[in-house]
Amino acid sequence: MFMEEEFLGFVITGHVDHGKSTLIGRILYDTNSLQEGRIEEVRKTCEMLGRQMEFAYVIDHLREERENEMTIDTAQTFFRWGNRDYAIIDAPGHKEFMKNMITGASLADAAVLIIDVAEGMREQTQRHAYALGMLGLEQVIVVINKMDKVGHKKENFEKVKAEAAKFLLRLKIKPSHFIPIAALHGENVVKRSENMPWYDGPVLLEALKGFKPRKSLKMRPLRFPVQDVYDFEGKKIAVGRVESGVLAAGEMVALPSGKKIIVKGLEGFPKAPKNAEAGINSGFFEDIGLKRGDVVCAGKLPHSGKKLEGSVFWLGIEPLKKGEKILCRIATQEAEGTVEKISKRMNSSTLEIIENDATKLEGTEAAEVLLSFSKPLVSDLFGEIPTMGRFVLARHGIVEGGGIITKAVE
Ligand code: GDP
């Protein structure tokens, strides 16, 4: 859909009511990304409700629409500015955001952390920041919102900026910019505000423009996790999504079995493509008995083993216990895992270490874990191939936690 070189996906995160929806609405409005009629529709609804037109409504409206459409990319809104396409990755609530981040439902290249200037950092802001730190996101902007509420005063901005910078530093996050904004009035979002002459940094969109676009995964080694194998007129066709590299005719290795496979060509309708790059769904005829969860690889091979260490974020209502058996998923692979060790149990809001060798992990806590599996799982490090370097933990089919792989153990 996009030229990869020109694409940047970013999350907007922050405590409830600090202005995420308003900011998204404002960005879309000021970049002329809202369809004709949409704004009018919202204006009418607001009139009916006897309320001033608010951008938060625009975005809530979009959300409803997306939910009704049941599209796969429910959490992304696209816009274009300058020569680049952007996706705003947005999750309506705190829990959805955390889930989105840890399961990798949508990968972010950058993050905008929004803080209400009158309220400062709040618990959810801190947890979100923790998740960003865990994922190693390096392109971060802090926007300090609702500057109109404090008379656009520099002192208020500086106070919240200092507080945020201090907290983020503990997570090794060094924001590229701290920007005073008023999302509701479009100040320093796309257009420069005249009410804050003391601020001489970039406005939000200029700051985003300065960020590096999404790294292409097509130059990495091939990873093709098999999603399904179908019978097709007596022959078998394996399908899935290319997670990295380029899938084309040739010799490959299926892991964890280590069997060689010669792919004669890709299948497709109406025309078979010559190759499929990272991010593309594809399929080919196979004769070695591939099944869901096998990972077809080429180039530098990934790790395949029964143990791994990871940073985990727990969201479950019931705690995760040491010794517990739990379903673990990496890409299309699934295996029963055992929680062998929980270390550095941490409050993800205060970053306080609760215990070094723990027997359980409560909801919203984070830790380092050692997991062992009933069968080998194929993985890469998160920093190399993100979708092969993340895992989720599920109980009774529901994702209750997840994290990134920090070390593969034999
Ligand atoms: P979310 O929960 O983070 O998505 O927050 P919303 O975007 O729904 O905003 C919460 C409230 O703050 C709404 O009533 C907004 O109109 C208001 N708000 C957002 N941005 C600003 C701003 O720049 N100035 C003022 N005064 N209010 C704002």
Image (cartoon, rainbow, N blue to C red):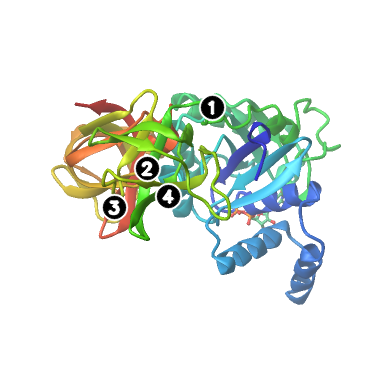
Of callouts 4 and 3, which one flags the residue occurring earlier in the amino acid sequence? 4
Of callouts 1 and 3, which one flags the residue occurring earlier in the amino acid sequence? 1
Location of mark 1 (residue): 138
Q: Which residue type does callout 1 highlight?
A: Glu
Q: From mark 1 to mark 3, how far is it between C-alphas?
A: 28 Å
Q: Which residue type does callout 2 highlight?
A: Pro
| Circle nearer the viewer, 2 or 3 | 2
Of callouts 2 and 4, which one flags the residue occurring earlier in the amino acid sequence? 4
Residues at discs 4 and 3 in contact (Cβ within 8 Å): no
> Badge 3, how many Cα within 10 Å: few under 14, some, many 20+?
some
> Badge 2, how many Cα within 10 Å: few under 14, some, many 20+?
many
| Circle nearer the viewer, 4 or 3 | 3
Location of mark 2 (residue): 225
Q: Residue at x 86, y 37 (%)?
A: 194
Where does residue 66 sit, x and y in percent of width and height? 60, 63
Location of mark 4 (residue): 99
Q: Residue at x 65, y 61 (%)?
A: 62
Q: Residue at x 50, y 55 (%)?
A: 93
Q: 44 left or right of 282?
A: right
Secondary structure beneath dot 4 equals: helix
- 398 and 305: which is toward the camera: 305
Where does residue 362 sit, x and y in percent of width and height? 27, 47
Location of mark 3 (residue): 394
Q: 178 left or right of 265?
A: right
Vertical comparison of 177 with 181: above or below: above
